[in-house]
Amino acid sequence: MELQGFLLTSIYILLIIVLVVLIILGIKLIMVIDKTDKLINDVQNKVSSFDPIFNFIDSAASSVTNSLVGIVELFIGFVNKILKKRKDEDENE
């Protein structure tokens, strides 16, 4: 009977120790999550500061693309006119 009481007491003490360790680990985990959240917010703020630069680059690239498309369309129209004239001349002969 005395051995059974000793084992129960030692089990309860070990459970209390495990509970305290889990509470300490939980608190440390919360602290790590807070630090990670602050880091992520800082990185997000720094990345968002580059948004105007990326918007400018995007608009510049769009302008260049639109200009090049216009030039290509003019070139294609010119080539089509030349080919159409040659085709009309060949049909007339």
Image (tube, grey):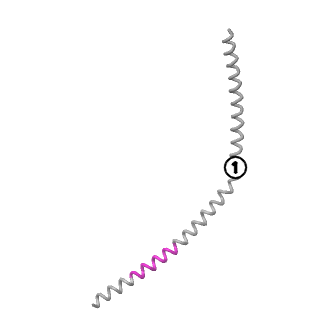
Residue drawn at (54%, 72%) of the image: 30
Residue drawn at (45%, 77%) of the image: 21
Q: Quadrant of residue 36?
A: bottom right
**Residue neighbourhood size for the residue with mark 1, other residues' Cα within 10 Å, grouped as few (<14), some (14–19), many (≥20):** few
Where residue 52 appears, as percent x and y from the top left, is 71, 52
Residue drawn at (71%, 48%) of the image: 56
Q: Is residue 19 magenta?
A: yes
Q: Quadrant of the C terminus?
A: top right
Residue positioned most to the left = 1
In front of the other: 33 or 84 = 84
Where residue 9 appears, as percent x and y from the top left, is 35, 87
Residue positioned most to the bottom = 2
Element type at marker 1? Answer: helix
Residue under pointer 1: 55
Q: Quadrant of the N terminus?
A: bottom left
In this rendering, is residue 87 above or below 41?
above
Q: Is residue 62 magenta?
A: no
In this rendering, is residue 32 above or below 77?
below
Helix, strand or loop: magenta stretch: helix
Where residue 84 appears, as percent x and y from the top left, is 68, 19
Amino acid type shown at disc 1? Asn
Is residue 43 toward the left or the right of residue 21 in the image? right
Residue positioned most to the front = 92
Give the number of marks: 1
The region drawn magenta spans 14-28
Residue drawn at (69%, 49%) of the image: 55
In this rendering, is residue 89 above or below 6?
above
Q: Quadrant of residue 78?
A: top right
